[in-house]
Amino acid sequence: METQLHRRAGMTAALLTTALLATGCATSTPAVNTDAEASATQVDQPTPRITLTYDGGIFVLDGETLELEGDLPIDGFTRVNAAGDGRHVLVTTAEGFQVLDAGTWTEDGSSYVAEPELTDLVFEADTAGHVVRHAGKTILYADGTSETTIFETDDLLETDGELPETEVVPAPEAHHGVSIELEDGTLLTTVGNSESRSGIRVLNEDREEVATSDECPSVHGEGTAANEVVVFGCSNGALVYDDGEITKITAPDEFGRMGNAYVTENSTIAVGDYKTDPDAEGYVLTKLTLIDTEAKTMQIVDLPEGIGYTFRDVARGPHDEIVLLGTDGQLHILDETTGAIEQSYPVIEAWEGPAEWQDPHPALTVNGHIAYVTEPASNGVHAVDIETGGVLASAELDGTPNEIAVAAG
């Protein structure tokens, strides 16, 4: 299967290289090897790989050119999450979290040695759910048992055909949840059962419960802001965990649901999606919430008319700015403290929300100064310079992209 690479008029390989360097991107474009006897392209450091799910498989693309590096068949609806080690992606399957090797470079960064591969390694889980990366750990959550599985992220690079050593933490009752371990070993994990979810538990490094809160109905989503302040979304606001204390921030609306947190570890502002009508049909939202994790306050931002988004369309940029892919087809850059739109860049055609959340619809992820945007209507994917709005590369795929994750290199 081939990928047709489409560049904007006048885009050349030299221009792409210049554009990437100008943005200060964490990746680098491979330099041409002029030695006729050399067998591999010379590079300064590993190149990111983009993984995209589609009906029947997973595409793996070069993060700079968007050229197809691998097409890995897999059945059913799957989700992808970066493992955090720069090389692997965790794919949710019926058995658990299956390890996808997105490919890598040699230890000294001089040559390409691995093709993308969906390995036989699986972290077993009953109904694999959320993946969280923090403080050098990767934390996996199984919705069918609410067990939390924790491993040292970089240990995945030393697999040698085996899974790394893990810690498995059980839970009282199974529910759709999430966990995170902090630098000191504290584990925060959600509380609920098959009927409802109510809050969080805090366990110390000996896995003894030291704090709890039941003030977070429908608890969902997690994000760690600056100073390891953790935010969880509720149907009536949010919970904030800060140095041993749990604070409830009540939404200004009777129903004010925050379901996902978009954070950086350098910013005290946590951004959340926000819904005020429990009976609203569809998955397009038009409001954001900005949570000041120091002041423990919540601000609601109304987006301009004609701009909506889904949970897949918000990220944070290299300077903590909010990056939002709107239903108007534009990539909007918002100030993190006010929610005001500072820049808007046209990228794809206007789109409508999905009938079901699993259905393909435009998605966004950010790596360094580059935003990757999918366009299911055209089977397309685009790499966009966040600083200028310039489209660095585009590709048309032989399949409709759905979920996206980056192995950062």
Image (spheres, rainbow, N blue to C red):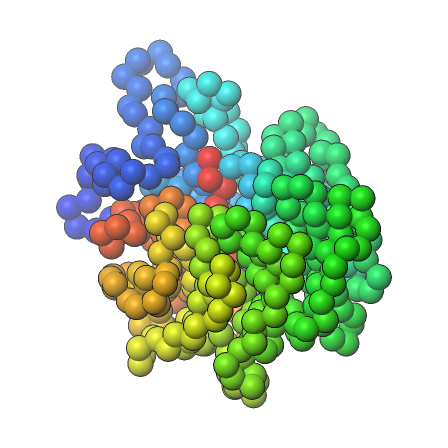
How many discs appear?
Answer: 0
Q: Is residue 225 left or right of residue 239?
A: left
Q: Is residue 205 left or right of residue 64?
A: right
Quarter of the view holding residue 130 = bottom right
Q: Where residue 20 sits in the image (x, y, percent)?
A: 27, 39
In this orientation, which residue lies closer to the viewer: 13 or 159? 159
Residue drawn at point x = 72 percent, y = 35 percent: 163
Up-down relation of residue 93 to residue 292 (above or below): above
Up-down relation of residue 213 to residue 62 (above or below): below
* Res 228 seen here: yes
Residue drawn at point x = 44 percent, y = 48 percent: 266
* Res 97 seen here: no
Q: Where residue 240 sits in the image (x, y, percent)?
A: 59, 62
Q: Is residue 392 left or right of residue 141?
A: left
In this orientation, which residue lies closer to the viewer: 6 or 111? 111
Q: Where residue 409 sits in the image (x, y, percent)?
A: 46, 35
Q: Where residue 245 sits in the image (x, y, percent)?
A: 65, 59
Q: Is residue 383 left or right of residue 114?
A: left
Up-down relation of residue 278 to residue 198 (above or below): below
In this orientation, which residue lies closer to the viewer: 198 or 157? 198
Up-down relation of residue 272 to residue 159 (above or below): below
| View extreme (left): residue | 10
Residue drawn at point x = 36 percent, y = 21 percent: 42
| View extreme (right): residue | 172
Residue drawn at point x = 60 percent, y = 38 percent: 136
